[in-house]
Image (cartoon, rainbow, N blue to C red):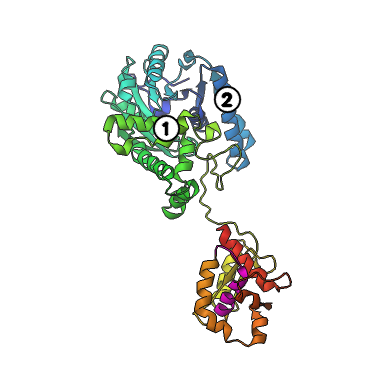
């Protein structure tokens, strides 16, 4: 039960002890968790029994992850769930001091929900919408209490993201905004106060950027993985734009863009055709199992968790790394760095997945050996470059004695034949392992 209202009929943040959340989709379930973990009693409402059940399953799964990561104990999880009371009718919100609506982003649905809540809720209760882009003013107009209606925009995943936008209209009472701002701080979140406008602050900044990433993908500028890698490894963002769109929901993002386009116009807010087609196909992101990435078959190379962000830029090496010319100095330091990154450094080329040749300047023995060894690669994607380099350095290789050409020492204690290399043919199976190292380097380049 909520506390008794202060003078003037307004509840304070500390007097709100029970909150109702209407709509138990991904966002609604997350908002329920936020309030329940802050110690508030929560009525979780969805008029669709199936959606209500799925929302409670989502809540339980999220709490179980928190336990597995050491964020909660089993006892704390049980206490959180005990504070949540599921219900399938709006009348269950009658005793709540605050109601947060999280139904789909359609104005007619939200206005209907607010009109019904206005009938069943206490006069002093605050009604808040979690809309990410729709007019809070238009939603409030469906009630007889526009002074106690505001926006309370959480970000997905609500239990992780710290920002909450508190949106006020020209009719919102200052006390309502103050109560919600204090309550957000009580939840451990960061509130920002925003006037009612399309996209508010965060989405007005974010969605054009995300939309532009889709345009880069559909016009073939880069792959989806490289676009996301550019944002994480280059710009320093915690998640790439296409992965973030999948997390937000492509349908939600499209709805926000349409609202922004309707209010501000211009090509900046016009949704990319690919985004619209994916939504029409039902490929709306993680919640559907597939969006820009396929989450059902786990095809993507870097898959972000729903409530964590990854920024792991290490690339898997197909085997040990062989360093040629790393006997001392910078080579030894490089070897130490590679081993510290978790990749083994091989003493020779056997089984190596990557060969790195270190040379200070052209003309050193290490470089000569590396260039001459390229001749055993035969017909590979490197053949043009190898041919040009061999041409430049043919005199260096040819000045060696016939016996040296037949069996030229290869760094690391192995030897490689350059006789067949000079004819541009692959070496025979009897060629020593130095040739295998060169082939391994070719394979690593082809893989790249």
| Farthest residue, direction right | 430
Q: Secondary structure at mark 1?
A: helix
At x 58% / y 84%, what residue is drawn?
398
Q: Badge 1: how crowded within 10 Å, few (<14), some, or many (20+)?
A: some
Q: Badge 2: how crowded within 10 Å, few (<14), some, or many (20+)?
A: some
Q: Position of residue 18 (x, y in %)?
A: 47, 23
Pick whichever, 435 or 328, lies toward us.
435
**Does the magenta-highlighted stretch encompass residue 369?**
yes
Specify start and end residues of the magenta stretch as a single range.
366-381
Give the left or right position of residue 257, taking residue 422 as reference: left
- Of badges 1 and 2, the one in the foreground is 1
Which quarter of the figure is the C terminus placed in? Answer: bottom right
Q: Which residue, given by chain and number where applicable, does mark 1 sit on?
A: 276
Q: Position of residue 131 (x, y in %)?
A: 39, 28
Give the left or right position of residue 414, taking residue 208 as reference: right
Q: Which residue, given by chain and number where applicable, does mark 2 sit on?
A: 54
At x 42% / y 41%, what residue is drawn?
214
| Farthest residue, direction left | 170
């Amino acid at each position: 039960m909520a506390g008794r209202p202060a003078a003037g009929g307004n509840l304070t943040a500390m007097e709100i002890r029970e909150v109702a959340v209407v709509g138990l989709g991904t966002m609604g379930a997350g908002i329920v968790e936020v309030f329940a973990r802050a110690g508030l009693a929560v009525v979780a409402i969805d008029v669709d029994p199936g959606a209500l059940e799925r929302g409670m399953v989502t809540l339980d799964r999220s709490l179980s992850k928190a336990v597995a990561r050491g964020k909660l104990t089993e006892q704390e999880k049980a206490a959180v769930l005990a504070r949540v009371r599921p219900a399938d009718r709006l009348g269950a919100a009658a005793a709540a001091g605050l109601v947060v609506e999280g139904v789909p982003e359609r104005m007619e649905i939200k206005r209907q929900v607010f009109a019904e809540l206005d009938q069943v809720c206490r006069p002093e209760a605050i009604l808040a919408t979690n809309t990410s882009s729709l007019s809070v003013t238009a939603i409030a107009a469906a009630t007889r209490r526009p002074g106690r209606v505001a926006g309370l925009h959480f970000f997905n995943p609500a239990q992780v993201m710290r920002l909450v936008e508190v949106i006020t209209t020209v009719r919102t009472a200052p006390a309502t905004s103050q109560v919600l701002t204090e309550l957000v701080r009580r939840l451990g979140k960061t509130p920002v106060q925003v006037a009612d406008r399309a996209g508010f602050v965060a989405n007005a900044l974010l969605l054009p950027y995300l939309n532009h990433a889709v345009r880069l993908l559909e016009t073939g500028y880069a792959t989806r993985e490289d676009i996301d890698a550019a944002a994480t490894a280059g710009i320093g963002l915690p998640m790439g734009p296409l992965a973030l769109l999948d997390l937000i929901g492509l349908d939600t993002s499209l709805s926000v863009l349409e609202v922004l386009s309707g209010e501000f116009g211009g090509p900046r807010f016009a949704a990319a055709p690919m985004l619209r087609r994916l939504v029409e196909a039902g490929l709306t992101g993680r919640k559907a199992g597939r969006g820009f990435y396929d989450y059902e078959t786990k095809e993507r190379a870097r898959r972000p968790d729903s409530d964590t962000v990854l920024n792991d830029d290490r690339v898997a090496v197909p085997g040990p790394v062989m360093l040629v010319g790393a006997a001392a100095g910078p080579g030894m330091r490089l070897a130490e760095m590679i081993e510290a990154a978790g990749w083994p450094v091989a003493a020779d080329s056997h089984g190596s997945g990557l060969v790195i040749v270190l040379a200070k300047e052209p003309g050193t023995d290490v470089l000569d050996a590396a260039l001459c060894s390229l001749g055993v690669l035969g017909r590979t994607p490197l053949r043009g470059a190898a041919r040009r380099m061999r041409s430049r350095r043919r005199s260096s290789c040819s000045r060696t004695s016939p016996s040296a050409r037949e069996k030229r020492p290869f760094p690391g204690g192995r030897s490689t034949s350059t006789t067949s290399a000079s004819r541009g043919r692959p070496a025979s199976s009897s060629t020593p392992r130095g040739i295998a190292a060169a082939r391994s380097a070719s394979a690593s380049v082809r893989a790249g």
